[in-house]
Image (spheres, grey):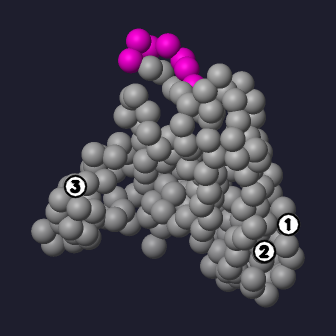
Amino acid sequence: MPKAWCPGEKGGEAIADILFGDYNPSGKLPVTIPRHVGQLPVYYNHKPSKTYWLEEGWGNSYADLENKPLWEFGHGLSYTTYEYSDLRISPEKSKKGLSIQVSLKVANAGKIEGSEIVQLYIRDVKSTVVRPVKELKGFSKVKLSPEEVVEVDFELSPEDLSMYDRNMKRIIEPGIFEVMIGSSSEKIHLKGNFEIIPD
C-alpha cells in the first residue's frame, strides 16, 4: 500500500475519508518508487541506452523480479476511470520561434465525480545530443462529473523544445518531436507528433 508521506495533523482524517470512499483521491507521484533497492537509480526520463538494457538486452526482468518500477512517476489512484481521445496538434509543422498548441478530450467514464491530472510528455526523436526517452512538459488537473467530457489545452513554447547543444548553447534543432499524453509516465493514452522545420 502506498505511504501517506507526511500528511500533517489532519492526515489521519484525510486518509480515512479516502479509504471509506468519502473523497475520491487524485494525487500523482512526483517520483518513481522502485520495487527493490537493486533497481536504483530509477527514473522515467532516462536516456535511450537504458531502454536497451531494460527491454532488449536483458529481456523484461532482472534475475528474480521484473524491471518495471513498483509505481512510476505520475502514478495515481482514483475510484473512477477516465478516457482520453481526440488528440490535436497545431501546427503539424512550425518554425523554431513559434508555439505548438496541443489539445485533447478527457471523459469521466465512471459513476462518481473525480479529478484527473493530464500529463504531457515530449520526445525529440533525433538530435545531435542524446535526449531522454520522454520529458514532462505540462500537466493540467481537471474536475469531472460522471460522464462529463472536457477539453484540455496545452501550449508548448520554444523554451519547452530547446536544449543545450555540445557547446552548451541553448538551441532548438529542426526535426520531429513526439507528443505523449498520459495519466502517468508509463500509462500513455494518446500519441502524435509535429515537426520543427529549418529556417
Gap between marks 1 and 3 measured at Cα: 39 Å
Q: For the residue carrying disc 2, how many other residues have a C-alpha within 10 Å: few (<14), some (14-19), or many (20+)?
A: some
Which image quarter: residue 152? bottom right
Determine contact: label 1, label 3, CB under 8 Å. no
Pinpoint residue 188: horizontal percent, then vertical percent: 55, 64
Q: Is residue 194 left or right of residue 142?
A: left
Which image quarter: residue 49? top left
Determine contact: label 2, label 1, CB under 8 Å. yes
Task: Determine the secondary structure under disc 2.
Answer: strand
Who comes first in sequence, dot 3 or dot 2? 3
Give whichever of 46, 190 is nearer the camera. 190
Q: Main secondary structure of the magenta part?
A: loop
The amino acid sitting under disc 3 is Trp
Instruction: Tell me what residue is drawn at x 56 percent, y 31 percent.
Output: 174
The magenta-colored residue range is: 166-172
> To which residue does mark 3 refer?
53
Give whichever of 75, 159 is nearer the camera. 159
Q: Is residue 117 above or below residue 199?
A: below
Pinpoint residue 146: horizontal percent, then vertical percent: 84, 81
Which image quarter: residue 77? bottom right
Q: Is residue 59 left or right of residue 35?
A: left
Give whichever of 143, 139 is nearer the camera. 139
The amino acid sitting under disc 2 is Ala
> Which label is found at residue 107?
2
